[in-house]
Amino acid sequence: MTLQDILGNFSLILFILTVVTGVIWFLDTFHLARKRRARADAVLAEFDARNAKLAGDGIKPDDNGRAALKANLLRQPTWIEYSGSFFPVIALVFFLRSFLYEPFKIPSTSMLPTLQVGDLILVNKYTYGIRLPIINKKVIEIGDPQRGDVMVFKFPENMSLDYIKRVVGVPGDTVTYRNKRLIVNGKPVSYKPLPDYLDEETLSYSKNFTENLNGVAHNILTNPRAPAYVPNPHDFPHRELCSYDAEGFTCKVPAGQYFMMGDNRDNSLDSRYWGFVPDRNIVGKAFLVWMNLGDLGRIGSFK
């Protein structure tokens, strides 16, 4: 793992910070604080003995400095104080992001119209099983991705990147995309035409349809000017399970793998090009837009 990979892996950074601040907190609580207390007791005992001797000699001692001396002796060094303060916060954030929910920001238009650039989404980390952070190894089975789910995963060609697409094929499925229509296991997916979709950034129109995949109705976009075939698919693992022609492609999804496509079908770099997503790459199921600073009306769940 390179330095760039480490800096680009926020979970790893959080893990390192949790360990470092946790070790400092533990060391201070069970060792350094006791040493400070023992030293303070010794110094204060000397202070009290000196004052007692002065009192015995008929000199009134000044006890005003005892409290300040004690506070100074017991005060944590700044680096320990900050570490102890940050540790519970960092540990809580690390736990929430690792096992419950993780936030992501949508960076591209590949999931239009379902998700827009700037959407801040939440991803459920336990729907598809409990995984160990950093290594992403599943340790507890809970559920598996289903057709129609919007899923975040590690990009197979660069594990430091997180991608988000829709699951259109699960293990054992035969996925066909012919003339921009999905066919799963020989059954055509139903489509309902909608008014054309205007992309306000590019001021261009796309064909808009409601696609019903496995009972999950969602909108998809197609560009009538874009070709139906897949240009230059990569040489990905299990490439032999896919066949491409001028009208589209057909892929047999292998065990432990998933076939992903963006809802903006002619503007999405997805499984058509770089292949299947292994189960070990799964991050979680996206389910909620929790904020969009440019459009507060976007806040809410989606399909």
Image (tube, rainbow, N blue to C red):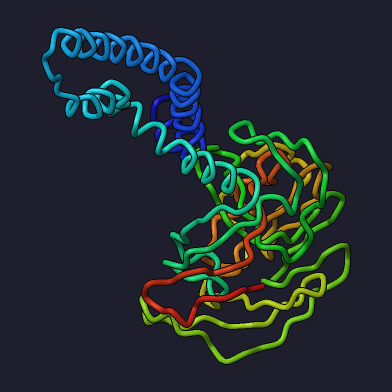
Q: Locate residue 249, reporting x and y percent.
A: 72, 58
Q: Position of residue 121 (x, y in %)?
A: 53, 63
Left or right of 64? Residue 73 is right
- Quadrant of the image containing the C terminus: bottom right
Which residue reaches farthest left? 59
Task: Identify the residue at horizontal 13%, vertical 12% (top origin).
Answer: 58
Instruction: In the rendered view, tell whether residue 223 sits above or below residue 268.
Output: below
Residue 243 visible to the viewer: no
Residue that protrudes farthest toward the bottom in the picture? 195
Q: Residue 302: percent from the left, percent from the top?
A: 62, 74
Q: Is residue 235 above or below residue 97?
A: above
- Residue 32 location, quadrant: top left
Residue 95, percent from left and from top: 59, 43
The answer to whether any part of residue 226 appears in the image is: yes
Question: Residue 130: which quarter of the image?
Answer: top right
Residue 36 or residue 213, whichever sits in front: 36
- Which residue is pictured at 32% across the width and 26% down the height? 76
What residue lies at 49% left-to-right and 40% top-to-bottom? Answer: 88
Q: Is residue 114 left or right of residue 50?
A: right
